[in-house]
Image (cartoon, rainbow, N blue to C red):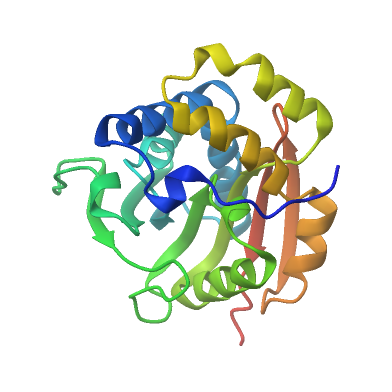
Amino acid sequence: MKQLDIPELLDTDSGTAEEITNALLDIRDINRRFGGVSTMQSLVERVAKEVGRTSFTVLEVAAGAGYVPQAAGERLKRRGIHLQITLLDRAQSHLPEKTSEDSAFHHAIVGDALALPFPDSSFDLVGCSLFAHHLVADDLLKFVNEGLRVCRNAVLINDIVRHPVHLALVYAGMPSFRSRLTRNDAVVSVRRAFTPGEMAALLKKTSAARIEIQRQYLFRMGVIVWKNCTA
């Protein structure tokens, strides 16, 4: 199935406030039910095993309300791994209204994923969920290189895989979506997504030390882009 570059409605701020809210709720449910949370958990556990640590600062890019890192963080905490999470999104309306030292999130910041507003090596990990497929190849390279600049250990990419069966499953799930934005964007997302092979070939063009790609539940992939700490 050929990859297509088609704009998603949520990216263009199309729709009412209610439609946008419902679309973000749909995305939360997709992540909860179809591998988004478990994929992030698996990626962080892999990094923790590799570096021998149990505490990480995480920048979640294109975070929305932050459901994926929060839910994964709760699971990881039960396994003795602790996350301090900062959220970044291009739109204030996508972020949670308040953060505090007692909340799941340390900060919530509006910013550009292609020009992250942080100094070098500000976080242990830079992650994103269901964001990579929103980017054309050149912009994905810019984002990953920015993530590698800002992180100390790795960039984590949690995304979907383009496949005809995945597209058929999206059409079958249409009645469960709350928002007309989701009914459009879920189809577009699968058509825009990368295959694992395409992702691997593309990421070889970054400054990464090495790349690991995991196949996850129901057409998900988890990618660890390791930083070259000697660079």
Q: Position of residue 3 (x, y in %)?
A: 78, 50
Residue 69 seen in the current view: yes
Q: Nearer the viewer, residue 109 or 174?
A: 174
Residue 165's place in the image compared with 97, above or below, is above
Q: Position of residue 154 (x, y in %)?
A: 56, 64
Q: Position of residue 117 (x, y in %)?
A: 33, 75
- Residue shown at the point (73%, 51%) measured from the top left: 4
Q: Position of residue 125 (x, y in %)?
A: 47, 60
Q: Quadrant of the C terminus?
A: bottom right
- Residue shown at the point (62%, 41%) measured from the top left: 189
Q: Residue furthest bottom?
A: 231
Q: Residue furthest top?
A: 175
Q: Nearer the viewer, residue 127 or 171?
A: 171
Please give left or right for residue 217 compared with residue 181 in the image: right
Q: Nearer the viewer, residue 46 or 85?
A: 85
- Residue shown at the point (67%, 21%) measured from the top left: 171
- Residue shown at the point (54%, 41%) measured from the top left: 40
Residue 195's place in the image compared with 226, above or below, is above
Q: Nearer the viewer, residue 19 or 101?
A: 19
Please give left or right for residue 138 compared with residue 99 in the image: right
Q: Quadrant of the N terminus?
A: top right
